[in-house]
Amino acid sequence: MASANWWQYEAPNFVTLEIFFETHDDFPGPRCGHTLTALNGCLILFGGTTAAESDGTSMPELRLQSVTNSVHRFDVFSQTWTRVFPDGEPPSPRALHAAASNGTTMLAIQGGLGRDGPCSGELYILEMNFNNEFRWQRLDVQGLNPGPRFGHAMSFAYHRVIIFGGKREHMLLGDTWAFDTTWRPAVWERLYPYGSGPIPRMYSSASTRDDNIFMLCGGRDCNGSPLGDAFGLEFRRDDGRWVWIPVAGVDATCRFQHSAVFVGPRLHVVGGVLSPTRLIDAEAAAVVLNTTNGEWLGGYPQYLVQRYGHASASYAGLVYVHGGLREGEFLCDLLVSDDGIIPQLVPSQGPQPAIQPFVLRRMSRSLSESTMDRLANLHIGVAQVQQPIGVNSNERNVNRGGLVRQLSLDRFEDPRGRLMRYSSLPPVTIKVVIKDLVQKVISTLLKPQSWEPPASREFFLSYDEVAELCSAAKKIIIQEPTVLQLNAPIKVFGDLHGQFGDLMRLFHEYGSPSTDISYIDYLFLGDYVDRGKHSLETVVLLLALKASYLSIFWFYVMTYIFIVQSSKMHVSLVQVEYPKSIHLIRGNHESCEVNLNYGFQAECLERILDRKGSGAFSLVNDLFNHLPLAALIQKKIFCVHGGIGSSVQSVEQIDKIQRPVYMGCQYESARVVKDLLWSDPTENDGFLGVRGNARGPTIVSFGPDVVKAFCERNKLDMIIRAHECVMDGFERFAGGKLITVFSATNYCGAVQNAGAILVIGRDLLVVPKLIHPLPPPISPEDTPDKAWLELDSERPPSPARGHPKPIFEIGSTSS
């Protein structure tokens, strides 16, 4: 029984707090999509909307014409709402924005949706002085910034405002930004943290722990599915790096449009939805993540907190929840819960107060005596620190629930002297030096003459090693342009589709990076995964080569030779440089929407141990989202995975596409990306113009006239693309203005095609180099391990170019 009682009370119980106000205008009323933050002994409510509409089949959508920019202050001691009217230029009315406070005198607002759509990406600061007077300040920030977005997460960590994710137009975001409030001039910094980070999402929630670790949990992915993971973002003072730390354990209930706030090391997650038609069950409506051990803790069924679009804040060990939506009804109540294991809150007696003016008076019957004592003591402490900045540091460093103490935008304290740590998120060290990891991969896999499929399907890298390799390669890839500018000589590879043995054969026959990387580049045109049985080997080796030849060999070796002759010292300087040599662009299978179904996810789940295959799958796909989309060799040969379709007009048009690119979402350049990755040439030179494509209704084929016009318009000699299996490994089109190259032989065991690469010399002469399918075995004992997955009607391969599609494959977008 003791154990059962302990579990019952792990997540505290919420009750409705009795509140007071003088006028209707002071009372914030029912609303959702707003924010609630703790600031200097009070709660600040900003924005939101007071109306929504629904078609009756899903959760109501916010009515943007009803958004507001009103500011309300709740005194946690007197339990009183008051509307405040700050000086300065206020933010425009908005909902689904993000807010964060430093806990004392400053509140930051960014993004959101307004009456006319997305709000600007400007950062607004609400400052409160010691006389409880408020003022808005719009910050003029130079350079790059997070830009307009909504449904994102934001919190203070150290003296920085941290932003993650959200949505812009039709694209989900997975970027991380930091605004250092101590820097002048004010600038946003795009962060590229180490470690295994979260996938792009919106409607997640974030809060900062006492030791300044930014914690993100839940959200909705690009497929509309709820997420149940959690990640900590830590700034390492010893080396100045930001590191994502996945939290052990997964929330029993995935959710989005929830709230999350810290009390000490315990992250309180409240409310949310599972889908546009289903609220979180009452049993999971209020849970706690104990970050000291990564455990999610439950409690009583709590119908009061079944809601979404609400706002939460914590202060003095209490968790407050305001408003939101439940079954189409706007809520105006303010809930409160004590973080103690045994609930210290008792339900208020009698009916809830009506929405009408009240005579202000102190009421404490909603809270226990111990809780009121704690509030009273903290209230006294707040009064003591409300002194001019000149007071001594001992008087200023009053414990504010672990929140960072800053007094104004121009004067921030250094929090290093007051850090606290908990065991669940230890200081992260890179366990494997990237150089050693790269060497491990290359020594294991880069064996052109002797590689054999491993006897065991267990992958030789751990999840942590895959994560570290992805992180290292991603840091290089995100610095590259969307259209790579390359030089000849260069080798161009077509689709590999996890047929790693064919990659080794090509290396063996025509040179590998271990022998010729110093004088020739390598370009891979995508479709590294799916169909074949060794997608992991293929993508991991290419990433290791990318990290190797950019991070290990691309540097200057400075050698000083001291020669003493006739009492004179001569210094000779020898300089050696290896160029950037390994280049990867994106194919249509470098997308979780595709490789979820065609083999790569299944391979990750099967081969990566400790049930971390799903995490590895997400990490690799996150890297795929950042890959360049095309390449230009000597400004004369345009290289792409699919083609130019109907929408691609210029190389500059492609280069302006911002990455990451998420294929499952709609965005401004979605049509162009679709054409680049999916389109095909027509059957032969006799079919002109833009036509339909058997792959599906949104995919097109383009004729030789379209190819020639594109080359003339962009002053190109030719186009090289992949994407289609061709019997000879390569095939010319449009009178030689376009070449298709395909590098996997006997594709899926169903097409006896050759594989090829294209070698382009300094004079831009293109020479095909072929390998042929391996001959059948002489005896059954000699039968090698198949390089491809077994076929089935759910994932048929596209036939070789020029061959009609079978009936069962019409409409498939599988290749």
Image: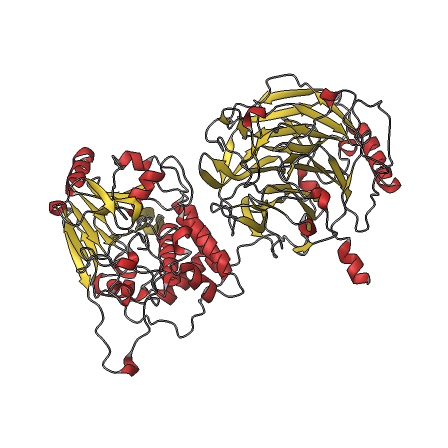
Q: Is residue 655 visible?
A: yes
Q: Residue at x 74, y 35 (%)?
A: 334
- The image quadrant that residue 752 belongs to is bottom left
- Between 168 and 782, the residue placed more toward the observer is 168
Which quadrant of the figure contains the C terminus? bottom left
Q: Is residue 727 above or below residue 180?
A: below
Residue 287, how many percent across, how many down? Answer: 69, 50
The single residue placed furthest to the front in the displayed view is 56
Residue 473 at least partly seen: no
Image location (x, y in percent) of residue 812: 32, 54
Where residue 483 appears, as percent x and y from the top left, is 30, 41
Along the viewing direction, whichever of 461 and 641 lies nearer the viewer: 641
Q: Nearer the viewer, residue 11 or 528?
A: 11
Q: Quadrant of residue 136?
A: top right
Determine the residue positioned at 84% across, 31% down.
Answer: 380
Count of labels shown?
Answer: 0
Q: Is residue 506 left or right of residue 72?
A: left
Tell me the quarter of the image containing the N terminus: bottom right
User: In the rendered view, does 492 fall on the left or right side of 361?
Assistant: left
The answer to whether residue 270 is above or below residue 378 is below
